[in-house]
Amino acid sequence: MGSLETDQRKGSSEEVSGALVIMPTPLRASSGPVAIWLTAAGWADACKDTLGSSWLITPDGTIEPEMARRLATTPRGNMAGKSSRSMIPVTAKTFLKDVRSLIWGWRFRSAGVHGPWTNRRLRFVWQRHDLFQSAGLIAARRFGCPMVLFVDAPVVWEARKWGVRRPWGRILELLGERTVLRRADLVACVSEEVAEEVCRFGVERQRIIVTPCAVDLDAFQYVGNGTGLRLHYGLEDAFVVGWTGSFRKFHGLGVLLDAAEILMRHVPDLALILVGDGQERAAIEKAASEKGLKNVVFTGTVPYASMAAHVSAFDVAVVTAPATTDFHYSPLKLKEYMACGRAIVAPRVGSIPSAIRHEHEGLLVEPGSAQALADALRVFYDKPILRKSYGEAALERVHADGTWEHQVRRVLDRLSETVIS
């Protein structure tokens, strides 16, 4: 430790300002709406607003946060029919991906050492955790400032939860994850569940902070009631329930279709808007058709600049989760819903109850329960005043403590308390 102390001993009269935000994922490796890029853009903008300057560094060069958002949400065609099948066994494919991560990490290790920030006295270096990635650690030691490692999940552990088998997984954790986790000055985890797992690597609890996903209120502005989008989709008079994200199994989106099937018996003007794309989209589209759901709009990937308008078109915004999955995520969509003043129905699982309070900013239901979700949606259908009240409370709450700037300030406060030793 002692990075700040080293920085102070330099005796420079230049004011400490700015931060490096290091994303080790190549841009070409991303497709569809990618939350990790939106997260990096949020941190980069918040560091600039708070510290005066920041640089977002990728294997493809230094980019502006707006470019990261644009690339993350550039429509890439309908992914619904795409398949991950190939002649290569899954275990072999996983091994090859891990070897590729090793190569990327080696090539990228010095990415933050040289650039326009070279003569600055940086406040900290932020890096997203990934296999074999130590660029943030190297840059932080080079500039004598703390290194903040952002962890949305330990890689091997999360993949195991998704059913990815790695006979070499323990060795991979030791060689590709543990070193940087244990050497980071501060480990910023998206949830308490992730923080608990990080402790397993030998990271002391006092060097861990929980920093849930947040929202940039300038980049994601409330735009009214979404009348234009509702007209565009022919849903101007409907009761619109909306969801945003990538179509992946762990989101448990099928529970929303089951709830809609129950709800449409009482709500004839029910409509769903599902924003996003992914390999599970074809299965969801088929399930919606089989259930006889009439007004279901699959928008595909939409540009980030249009996301707020889409969310504002929802009467109620939904987060879903299957009943049988351990929930360690911090849904980016949740804070975006709040920023648009939407009433929210979400599962009572993981970190979500700490973000929205039941019967205040939204309604919390049992994960995986279609009946509970349908009942909550019907409450909002029957009581428009209630959903307006909850939406206003959600908007007020996200302004109070749900922005990326709040997370940067929390990190700065923790660094000032714990890094000097």
Image (cartoon, rainbow, N blue to C red):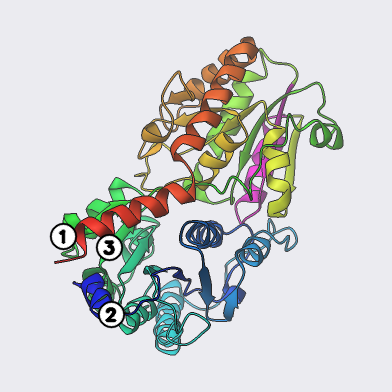
Q: Quadrant of the N terminus?
A: bottom left
Q: Nearer the viewer, mark 2 or mark 1?
A: 2
Depth check, mark 1 against mark 3: the one in front is 3
Span colored in magenta: 270-293
Q: Are marks 3 and 2 in contact (CB under 8 Å)?
A: no
Of residues 160 and 127, the one drawn nearer to the viewer in this rendering: 127
Q: Which numbered disc covers residue 11? A: 2
- Towards the viewer: 39 or 50: 50
Where residue 98 sits in the image (x, y, percent)?
Answer: 40, 79
Mark 3: which amino acid? Leu
Name the quadrant containing residue 312. Answer: top right
Asked if residue 213 shows in the view, the reply is no
Lower sequence index among marks 3 and 2? 2
Specify the quadrant that holds the C terminus. Answer: bottom left
| Residue 170: quadrant of the picture | bottom left
Q: Amino acid at mark 2?
A: Gly
In the depicted structure, whether residue 50 falls above or below residue 144: above
Find the distance from the CA under tag 3 to the CA under tag 2: 24 Å
Looking at the picture, how far across and down is residue 225, in whole percent? 73, 29
Left or right position of 149 against 340: left
| Residue 395, quarter of picture | top right
Query: Residue at horizontal 73%, vertical 40%?
Result: 309
Counting other residues with Cα less than 10 Å from the Cα at mark 2, is it few (<14), some (14-19), or many (20 or more)?
Answer: few
Residue 186's tag is 3
Give residue 291's position: percent from left, percent from top.
67, 30
Q: Which residue is mark 1?
A: 204
Q: Residue at x 74, y 46 (%)?
A: 299
